Amino acid sequence: MAARQRVYSPHTREAVALLGRLVRTGRIERRITASDVSERAGITRVTLRRIENGDPGTDIGLYFEAATIVGVPLFSASPAELRRANREAVDRLTLLPRHAHSPRVDDDF
């Protein structure tokens, strides 16, 4: 039996393709070889090729690591801004209920 391939939304595919292109552009502009990025990220050149080609099945952490190595800003923020945004997200989460619940509908009329 063949494995089912995951289906991604067009928006997701476009976003991943853009990030992959930004990684490749950053690598080439900074004159960093694919071998050097792969070695620094702890991945194979095949995985880097998948990232640069926008493969949505590649681990998001690997995309972020490759982007960081080649100087692509993540979330258009500095590391300090990312830390601040993460703290704000934690604070916001502490104010929300622990679990999401479907709204109760009283349809007894």
Image: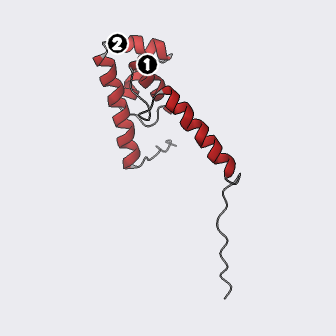
Numbered disc 2: secondary structure: loop
Q: Is residue 49 above or below residue 92?
A: above
What kind of residue is marked 2? Ile
The numbered dot on residue 32 is 2
The answer to whether the residues at label 1 and label 2 have Cβ atoms under 8 Å apart is yes
User: Mark 2, residues whose alpha carbon is within 10 Å: few (<14), some, or many (≥20)?
Assistant: some
Q: Which residue is mark 1?
A: 69
> Which percent across, then down, holds residue 103?
64, 68
Q: Earlier in the sequence, mark 1 or mark 2?
A: 2
**Residue lying at 40% horizontally and 10% vertically, measured from the top left:** 36
Image quarter (top left, top right, bottom left or bottom right) of the C terminus: bottom right
**Residue lying at 41% horizontally and 49% vertically, measured from the top left:** 9
What kind of residue is marked 1? Ile
In the rendered image, the residue lying farthest to the right is 98
**Residue lying at 57% horizontally and 36% vertically, measured from the top left:** 86
> Which percent across, then down, holds residue 100?
66, 57
Q: CA distance from mark 1 to mark 2?
A: 9 Å
Using residue 21 as the reference point, say whether residue 56 is left or right of it.
Answer: right
